[in-house]
Amino acid sequence: GVSQYAQNRVEKRGLSGKLSFVGCNANVDLDRLLTLYTESADGEEVDDGSSEGGSGSNNELKFVSIQFPDPHFKKSHTKRRVVTPALVTTLAKFM
């Protein structure tokens, strides 16, 4: 998908270890993915697709970009929103 294409471009430009992309349902999978990501930084064997080991500082979440998050502005569409208090709490936990 799009995130794999972007990740391949990172490698071609020599930015491996400095920039990563992930595509997921943020309200369902993000906490699990970020937990795996930080565990790999702690030296546990978790395959995150990276061939480089981490000292902890390389796997710190520093920036999050959510593209076109909430086209559902009506109150009746609250359940469809991407940016929710739970998502913000998850992101804050890993930053």
Image (tube, rainbow, N blue to C red):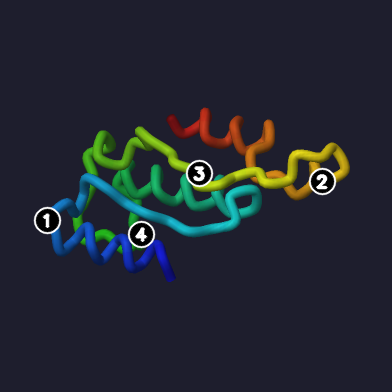
Q: Secondary structure at mark 3?
A: loop
3D distance between C-alphas at marks 4 and 1: 18 Å
Q: Amino acid at mark 1?
A: Gly
Q: Amino acid at mark 2?
A: His
Counting other residues with Cα less than 10 Å from the Cα at mark 2, is it few (<14), some (14-19), or many (20 or more)?
Answer: few
Counting other residues with Cα less than 10 Å from the Cα at mark 3, is it few (<14), some (14-19), or many (20 or more)?
Answer: few
User: Which of pointers 4 and 3 lies earlier in the amino acid sequence?
Assistant: 4
User: Which of pointers 3 and 1 lies earlier in the amino acid sequence?
Assistant: 1
Q: Nearer the viewer, mark 4 or mark 3?
A: 3
Residue visible at 37% across and 58% down? Answer: 46
Nearer-the-camera pick, 64 or 33 = 64
User: Which of pointers 4 and 1 lies earlier in the amino acid sequence?
Assistant: 1
3D distance between C-alphas at marks 3 and 1: 24 Å
User: Which of pointers 4 and 2 lies earlier in the amino acid sequence?
Assistant: 4
Q: Nearer the viewer, mark 1 or mark 2?
A: 2
* Relative vertical location of residue 16 with respect to residue 41 in this rendering, above or below: below
Tag 4–tag 3 contact (CB < 8 Å) = no
Q: Nearer the viewer, mark 3 or mark 1?
A: 3
Q: Give me the disc on residue 48.
A: 4
Q: Could you tell me residue 24's position as x and y percent?
A: 53, 58
